[in-house]
Amino acid sequence: MSKKQLSPPSDEFKSAVLDTSSLVVDCQFCGRTHFTDEFPNELGESELKQLMKQHKKDPDKYVLHEDCVKWGMMDGKQAVVDCQCNYLAKYECFIWHHRYVISEYLLERTKNNKDIADRESKLVEKVNSSINLSK
């Protein structure tokens, strides 16, 4: 039985995950090292030579990018936005298929947090007025 191949994550999801870009990043979902040779002076000549050597040996594990490597955090791990492992697609698929449950949860959780914040605000007002009365 073959696994169903997921489509790459949408541009909207990649944009939401994208946090920064770097010269070298490890995708912590699959272990691939992504790097660029676009800025050799900033990366360091010896590190770039080593990465290029590893890339020639194993281009699937050491992935060369034309520009900086775009990445963000997902589930506490570094996720390279366009990594071949396509792991971000699993998260997007999960979120999209459960969007009604997730939106209800966020609505209730936000409402509850607002209620707590309102109570805390009233307490702060009482404390402040008590302090002002005692002066």
Image (cartoon, helix red, strand yellow):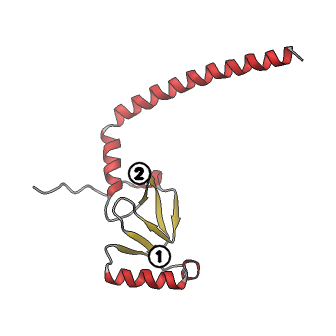
Residue 11: image location, x then y, percent: 41, 55
Question: Is residue 6 found left or right of 27 in the rendered image?
Answer: left
Question: Is residue 122 found left or right of 129 in the rendered image?
Answer: left
Residue designated by label 2: 13
Task: Tell me, yes or no, whether the two marked residues, 1 and 2, touch with CB atoms within 8 Å.
Answer: no
Residue 70: image location, x then y, percent: 47, 64
- In the picture, which quadrant includes the C terminus? top right
**What's the residue at 67%, 22% (across, down)?**
121
Task: Give, as a three-letter code, the residue at label 1.
Answer: Thr
Mark 1 Cα within 10 Å, few/some/many (few <14, many 20+)? Answer: many
Task: Give, as a three-letter code, the residue at label 2.
Answer: Phe
Q: Is residue 134 above or below residue 82?
A: above
Task: Describe the element under mark 2 as helix, strand or loop.
Answer: helix
Task: Describe the element under mark 1 as helix, strand or loop.
Answer: strand
**What's the residue at 62%, 21% (across, down)?**
118
Q: Is residue 74 above or below residue 35?
A: above
Question: Is residue 127 found left or right of 120 in the rendered image?
Answer: right
Could you give the CA–CA distance between mark 1 and mark 2, rounded to whole angstroms?
23 Å
* Of residues 33 and 13, the one drawn nearer to the viewer in this rendering: 33
Residue 96: image location, x then y, percent: 33, 42
Query: Picture quarter containing residue 44?
Result: bottom right
Q: Earlier in the sequence, mark 1 or mark 2?
A: 2
Mark 2 Cα within 10 Å, few/some/many (few <14, many 20+)? Answer: some
Residue designated by label 1: 36
- In the picture, which quadrant includes the N terminus? bottom left
Query: Picture quarter containing residue 66?
Result: bottom left
Q: Is residue 101 above or below residue 64?
A: above
**What's the residue at 40%, 28% (across, down)?**
104
Residue 55: image location, x then y, percent: 37, 80
